[in-house]
Amino acid sequence: MTYVWSALPFLAAAAACAWAARTRIHWWALVAAGAALLLLTAVFDNIMIALDFFHYAPEHLAGLSIGAAPIEDFAYPIAGALLLPACWHMLRARRRTSPAHTSPAHSSGASPQPPRLSPQVTPRAEGPPSFMRSLLPHLMLSSRPASWINTAYPFGAAYVVVAHQIDWAVVVGVIFFLVPYNMAMYGINDVFDYESDLRNPRKGGIEGALLDPSWHRPILVSAAVGTIPFLLLLMVASGPATWLALAVSMFAVVAYSAPGLRFKERPVLDSITSSTHFVSPAVVGLTLAFDRTEAAVPATAYVVLAAFFLWGMAAHAFGAIQDVVPDREARIASIATALGARATVRLSVALWAMAGVLMLFTAWPGPLAAVIALPYLVISVPWWNVSDGDSAQVNRSWRRFIWLNYFGGFIATMLLILA
């Protein structure tokens, strides 16, 4: 498979999102940003290739290049320039119209009641084209586009590091863990957390959708329709080890939020399950690489997975702190409601520190990845003595956490290239 084919899905997805938001995008700004990204890509790609940080297999290239940088590398800044403003406008549009931001009772601090729905907003009353145009922004908002990379990257990186190749199976897996997986994970959560999310002022935007009940069934159906074909393709491409990893991953996705299981309401198990959401794609990547190439999984990979798992538990626990008050009002248990805000902050700090220490026991240049833990400690330690009453203020650091993930991914990528 050529690099062109691996880039096309990302370009297609970004173009579709930009087309859906075309009336709200300032195209002159998009062109300017895209030109800047292309220029930076040309400069730094050539520098890194000249320094022999990485190279490309000639048989997988189209043959066109700018300097030493193959033309395929420029697909990704184009995709980013199209996707980010489209996601931004879709999220802002949904946030302005969500019940959490239009209900007077909610803004005054009282617990709002679910809004009454008029027949005009019921999706079944719309024709198919209109319904699909309305459904796509809801799916986009519910899937948390800012977090897509957090599941697709671990899968892709694990596969490529072990298999040393890009084939159709890894492309299918990256697409699956990029969009459908997040549609299922967050969509199921948004549907079954609706009552508690009504009381949570940070819902309705980048930190979580607040979906009108009329959209709950379409979201669940879309999650099933979007995931099943990809799961079947990955099962065809793999063996029992990958099947087991996929089963554990999807069970964690459903069990976290679905009625009857609701692992998110079982303190400590909630953090373990949440961490599984992000570590299991990496496990799937490793098992799939082994199934397809029989390449040995390096022992250091297990240490990296353990560190990643501790990081995931810390991330979930720290994120739960800001919801202590609304969760208790909704009678939802979590690791933070059980331990209290102060103890949960200290647990998060300890888990992030342990993750960093574990990386010191990996093969070079793995120990350098220990520095990734430092920014998370910087944003969490100031809340060492936070009270339950002030727990909502932790959201200030949580917003930084979302973007720190991109910094951590950048460092991890540079180390993988160095390795």
Image (cartoon, rainbow, N blue to C red):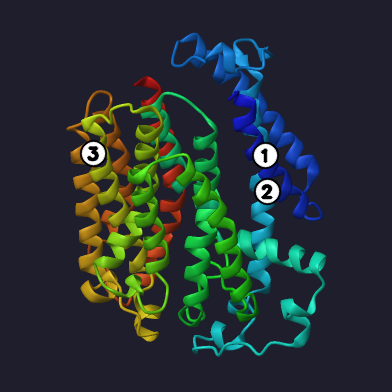
**Which amino acid, mark 1?**
Ala
The reply, left or right, for residue 273 in relation to residue 112 is left
* Residue that numbered label 2 is attached to: 85
- Mark 1 near mark 2, Cβ–Cβ under 8 Å? yes
* Residue that numbered label 1 is attached to: 81
State which quarter of the image contains the C terminus: top left
Q: Which percent across, then down, holds residue 353?
A: 21, 46
State which quarter of the image contains the N terminus: top right
Query: Under tag 2, what secondary structure?
Result: helix
Q: Nearer the viewer, residue 236 or 288?
A: 236
The reply, left or right, for residue 142 in relation to residue 317 is right
State whether residue 187 is above or below residue 155. below
Report which quarter residue 2 is drawn in. Answer: top right
Label 2 or label 3, whichever comes before in sequence order = 2
State whether residue 270 is above or below residue 294. below
Checking the image for residue 59, the label placed there is: none
Q: Is residue 315 visible?
A: no
* Residue that numbered label 3 is attached to: 302
Q: CA distance from mark 1 to mark 3?
A: 36 Å
Q: Measuring 32% from the left and 48% from the top, which residue is drawn there?
A: 376
Q: Which percent across, then down, holds residue 112?
A: 54, 88
Q: Which percent across, then down, holds residue 227?
A: 54, 56
